[in-house]
Amino acid sequence: MLIVFNILIIVLGGLIAYWWANQGLFSALLHLLCVIVAGAIALAFWEPLVGVAMRGTFFDHYAWGVTLVVLFALSLFILRLIADRLAPFNVALPHWANMVFGGAAGAAAAVLTLGVFVIGAGFVQSKSALLGYRGWGRDHRTAEVRELNSMWVPVDRLTAEFYSWLSVTSLSSGRPLRHFAPDLHRQATLVRDSYKDGTGQIALRPSEASVNNLYEMSDGARTHILVDVHFDNGARDFGSQLTLSSSQVRLIGEARGTAAPEVFHPVAWRRENEFFLFDGVTSYVTSVPGREYADIIFDFPVSRGFQPAFLQIRNTRYDLRRTRLKQAPTSLVAMFGRSTDVETPETFSPKPIGSVLTVSNDIRPINVSTNMLPPSMKESDKFLTRGEATFGQSGERPAPGLRIKGIFEPPGTRCVKLDVSRNGPADIFRLLTQVPENATLALVDSTGTEYSPIGYMHRRQDGTEIRLRPSRRLRSIEQFPVLPTSGTESLTLIFYVTEEVTLTAFRFGDYTVGTCNLFVPENV
């Protein structure tokens, strides 16, 4: 879908440029000027109008995007009417000048127009990906906020950077876009990185949260800013439970001159006396179920000398410049100053994994019949062969003649399962930041032969997901879900291993995660 999106942007931009090239250089330049002014007007009045538009209704989740696009379109329409009245006639120029320079002016107008629309679409409640375009979000492996993918012609980035530059130069004001809303194109994709691939809320009314305290501490290596935020009842996702990803919260620093400020995202958070890390794509700030309010403390590792200016939550900005920065109390230092020592191949010690390694094709606790399998999962003789599906926590037992017995084992192989959940002996998640992106997972037998996973079982609170890809294998960590640190989820890797071999180790890249001595018997 990303390719289709890129082609669509290029085609639309080309058509706009071609149209204005045919209209002539003078008309193209006039239109470009109207586009520039319309964008400036839209961005200038955007935030105040959003504050008026958000009334606690369903429209709140569309207010940021719709308001920006409507303001831009309306401003451009009015400016075009005025321009056509003031300059009703074209200027005669050579055809080549119209096509070359008029086309260039039309292309510039196309980039700005499409950029505003893409940025506006980013602030509309939807899936995390917009036709495959993710932009910025949390890395699947490390949960760090970074650029996940980009457009061939990054119209959103070019537009945001253009108006950011104007805001501190020719259109400078007391509230420049570069200082108050830096990297607008990033923010337009970060807010969509919400709970369950975009199903979480992406808007927050200013009255629904407030900053209680602002603390500073040092762990010896870095400075940390701790922001204590109170969330009211309206901040909960659609009246249910508050959920926030680290992408949706950012701390903006004080800016000097025309330079852009530093921006940081939180790495940890505290709720009451519970401490959590943003160390997985399933790690979210959550309120206590059933409670109307939540007090959350966010931990932002920052550079030395950093001065916080604004806190942005779901694109709503809270001014911190008048909030006194206090020294963090001992209780917070003890909680947020936990050791984050990095393990290296020299310091990492493999553990015995025999207790979490089994020869089994069982799929318990799943009980499902052949006629209840979704089309995405295939079976043969009541054994799962390939595909993916999520099975709920059903207590019903299917008829014996229809019950799925387990995972299919090809002749000459056995199904071996390894639990790699957090805090277990085969925990792979403590190594996510140490291994390269192309690091592979593999069981190793006594002859040195490696066996890559053919699938996994991911147990969550809402059910168990099974994914089987025996023809391609799942070698990269990016093909597996990253578990939260809460310990509420588990991940079991599934391997096809040759009969009558002895498994001796489990490796993740250059690391030997665990050792074992498991004989794989013949399937009788």
Image (tube, rainbow, N blue to C red):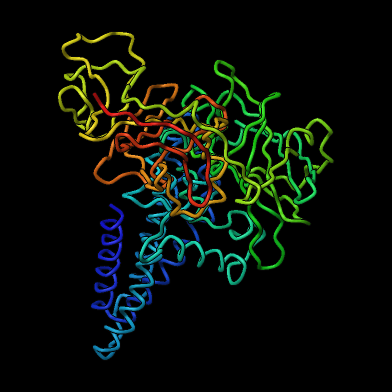
Question: How many circles with numbers are drawn on the protein?
Answer: 0
Q: Is residue 42 left or right of residue 167?
A: left
Identify which residue is drawn at 66% across, 57% down.
262
Judge left or right: residue 355 versus residue 417.
right
Q: Closest to the observer: 11 or 107? A: 11
Residue 373 lies, in percent from the top left, at: 21, 23
Residue 51 shows up from this direction: no
Q: Can the viewer see residue 495?
A: yes
Of residue 418 and residue 31, the one placed in the foreground of this image is: 418
Residue 354 position within the rendered picture, expressed as x and y whole percent measured from the top left: 49, 29
Where is residue 291, by image quadrant?
top right
For residue 297, side relative to residue 65 (left or right): right
* Residue 381 location (% of width, % of height): 15, 23
Residue in the image at 39% along x and 46% along y? 447
- Quadrant housing residue 276: top right
Q: Position of residue 97 (x, y in %)?
A: 30, 88
Q: Quadrant of residue 349?
A: top right
- 28 or 247: nearer the viewer: 247
Q: Could you tell me which quadrant the C terminus lies in? A: top left
**Residue at horizontal 55 percent and vertical 46 percent from the top:** 48
**Residue at point 36% right, 71% down?**
31
Q: Looking at the image, which is closer to me, 116 or 308?
A: 308
